[in-house]
Amino acid sequence: MSGSFLLDTNIVIALFGDDNAVKEKLAAAQEIFIPNVVIGELIYGAYKSSRSLENLDRIDELTVSNVILGSDAETARLYGEIKSSLRQKGHPIPENDIWIAAIAIQHELTLVSRDAHFTEVDRLHSERW
């Protein structure tokens, strides 16, 4: 397995949980990227946890050792298109996941997630790890 992947929050959490399947697939990947939205979700989760400082340190390590992709005007355009399409289909998904999908489409990356609802997003290439 090889390729360029964008990681969803649940994949990073699995990595932090020492999930061997995720670690093996990441080791075989050509490139790994993380959306800024995922970092925000992880930080929120860290503050809710009983081990906030430890979890924040892990997130800091993750951000230093990986490329974090943010949003710009093109991402916002794609966000609007995706949200409109999902509304027309009658299949809304969480707001943050629309932003994550927009970043993946913009950068032509395969989104890795354990959330089945990403299959509703047109033009999005995704894999379930």
Image: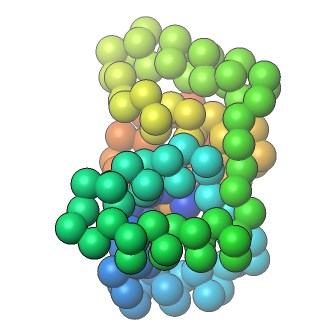
Task: Examine the rendering and report whether any part of residue 105 can be seen.
Answer: no
Residue at image location 71% in from the left, 50% down from the top: 69
Q: Residue 7: x percent and y percent?
A: 55, 60
Tell me if I can see residue 79 in this picture.
Answer: yes
Compared across the picture, whether 102 is left or right of 87 comes to right
Foreground: 129 or 57?
A: 57
Q: Quadrant of the C terminus?
A: bottom left
Q: How is the image coloured?
A: rainbow
What residue is shown at x 50% (from left), y 18% (from top)? 83
Report whether 108 appears left or right of 99.
Answer: right
Q: Residue at x 25, y 54 (%)?
A: 48
Percent across and percent down for residue 18 are 37, 87
Total number of numbered discs in the rendering? 0
Q: Position of residue 87 (x, y in %)?
A: 41, 12
Depth check, front residue: 74 or 71: 71
**Residue 67 sits in quarter:** bottom right
In which quadrant will I find the N terminus? bottom right
The correct choice, above or below, for 28 with respect to 76 in the image is: below
Instruction: Answer above or below: position of 104 versus 74.
Output: below
The location of residue 72, given as percent across then percent down, is 77, 30
Does residue 112 lie above or below 55 as drawn? above
Determine the image quadrant of residue 27.
Answer: bottom right
Residue at (77, 46) in percent of width and height: 107
- Front-lying residue, 22 or 66: 66
Q: Residue furthest left?
A: 50
The image quarter in which residue 88 lies: top left
